[in-house]
Amino acid sequence: MIVTLVLFLSGALAASPTDHARILELRREIAHHDELYYRKNAPEISDAAYDALKAELRRLEQAYPDFGDRGGGGTEGMGDGGAAGGVAGEKIGDDRAEGFAKRRHGAPMLSLDKAYSDAELSAFYARASGTLGRDEIAWRVEPKFDGIAVSLVYEHGRLARAVTRGDGEEGDDITANVRALCAPPEVLAIEHEAPALIEIRGEIYLGLEEFARLNREREAAGEPVFAHPRNLAAGSVKALDPATNAGRRLSLVCYAWGAVEPASARPASLGDFAGMLRAWGLSVVEGARTGEGWTELRTAVDALRDERARLGFPTDGVVVKLELTADQERLGTGPATPRWAIARKFPAERAATRLVGITWQAGRTGVLTPVAELEPITLDGSRVARATLHNPAEIVALDLRIGDTVWVEKAGEIIPAIVGVDRSRRAANAAPWMPPEVCPACGGQVAAEADEAGGGGRVGLLRCVNDACPAVLARRVEWFASKNGVDITGLGPATIAALVESGKVRGLAELYRLERADLLALPGIGERSADKLLASIAASRSAPWPAVLGGLGLPGVGAGRAEALAKAAPDWAALLSADRAALAAAGLDEGVADAVAEHLAKPAVRVELAALAKFGVGTAKGEATANAGAFAGETVVLTGRLQRWTRTEATRRLEAAGARVDSNLTKRTTLVVAGEDAGAKLASARERGITVIDEAALTERLGEAE
Ligand code: IVH
């Protein structure tokens, strides 16, 4: 495996001896990334890195205009549909894929021209104003949603189909997925009479919160996370297996119309159209601004630019449109874009710095993700010293070498990414990057795997296969202790790292063996936090069973599937004896059922699960309900310090077992629990002849003794 990877990488890296070789290499790379982006919805490099490849190719092709065929991966290959400015990278392309019925659009689905500066926007306005013969034109400005364009076709008010843009003339029928993901109205509400036919154009997108949630779930399932909400939206609308979309909620916004029959039913303005959409029960762009004239327009664009960062959905600019249908019709349409609308795109802030190293972050499933270590710079007002590299393929695509001067940008305006290398400043002896042969965290063996999402088995994922790798274990514990799992408050990454490093925690179950002294030995943990942490670890034993299953990190099992699995395997015994058939019967799809069964067969896994079972995790015993009623009728006073629980924790358990807990001795008191260093209350209880028990007796009676 390793050998194959190294061979591949060195092949791809064999430094381009000439610019011609680099041109060929770039064309191949770009064709590969186009395939992943358009056909598989699974790009393996960021948009910014892709743009950088295209820009480099364009520079070289301009320098050698006679060099070879420019088709395929050439810069003209994935044209932008006649975009003004013609900057590479805006991907419109052709999204049609196998497995979907093809549908022709009644009116073509157009792309938009782009303005990259105020001057370009002003030129757009001046052209419109020249054609219309007046200065004051009514306009509308809205966020440009970064999702997947869709055409909803309503015939006599009924949803007939939903179609992707495709090549603009013909797209894929994605009706079933759109119904499942966005639930558009099947029948238009009748407040506003529906025309015989209307194509409603809009965007299917993923809200940023939902994006974060789904990625957390994918991570739980040991699947690679999506780099951008648009990729996830695209993957969802193009899913052939409906199960892919279970638990996903996508949003739909409508902003334009295509064919309308009869033509007289066409709205007179975008404002009217928004009113119709609302009346029909479809969602419209919120926060749009309207006005007249250039000065106001410019202010509105700037205002929306600033607001974009606070919107809960991904955007890649703003769209400026003429408000009145009559004005739109007079301006008409060019070869692929309307003349009455333009997208204003804003450059991400970009800065040059030096790549000082590439480090690796081990994930919960052992996947190693490269991170660029940079000489710190300031970008968009924040300090940036690291940038994501997503995967080894990105290092190869950029041909990154340690010591390179690199350009850094906020990718998708969310996370910093390296978008290019200043090759003119590369040291002559800069060595090509080679993948690590051993896990940088544990020195253990590394396996190279084909990245299924990336397809083609090219540069794969690197995975540490050492079951005992401390970095991987730390991630597993973090996951288990997080809200996705049993939710142990106060157990943060620093504490986990210290516990793993000191050898106190060598598996999930060892959390439950921790003693006060173990925690006190950690840097920065005092008595109070040690006690609190012990209490929350103890309380986590009573976490609901699906949460325990979700926290285990079983392959392919995120929160949604954990619920299903919990029903089929309601306890540890059932889980440990579950075979493929039982897992499949629980509704896990075949691949996941196989992976889980294989995982559960591993001796190390079985030992860990049995230990968790022994500690009562997931058996609701932590609530002290095992001996429900054990303290019924007792009025208890706690005094002195308990080892295992805080007062609050012990009180909760006693109450759950039927006791009433008071803070002071009274005539009602029937029992005193004396911890360490108990003083006056203990003496007084003895004097009054009240029964006194110690912590061991308390745990015993609660049924919590180990
Ligand atoms: S109006 C003739 N409004 O951006 C096209 N488009 O790059 C009229 N888009 O094809 C489109 N947000 O898929 C419009 N608020 C918005 C938009 C928007 C995103 C998309 C749309 C369009 C693409 C052009």
Image (cartoon, rainbow, N blue to C red):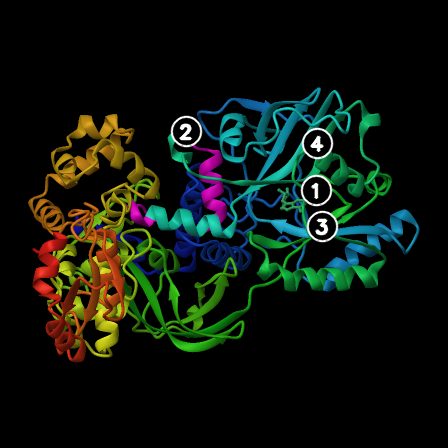
Q: Are marks 2 and 4 in contact (CB under 8 Å)?
A: no
Which of the two discs, 2 and 1, labels the residue nearer the N terminus?
2
Relative to 123, is 218 above or below?
A: above
Which of the two discs, 3 and 1, labels the residue nearer the N terminus?
1
Task: Indicate the quadrant where residue 454 lies.
Answer: top left
Whether residue 72 appears in this view of the structure is no
Mark 1, ligand 1, within 8 Å: the answer is: yes
Residue 242: image tag: 2
Task: Indicate the quadrant where residue 455 lies.
Answer: top left
Who is closer to the viewer here, 134 or 428?
A: 134
Distance CA(mark 4)–CA(mark 1): 28 Å
Who is closer to the viewer here, 374 or 192?
A: 192
Distance CA(mark 2)–CA(mark 1): 34 Å
Side (left or right) of 21 relative to 465: right
Residue under pointer 4: 280
Residue under pointer 3: 342
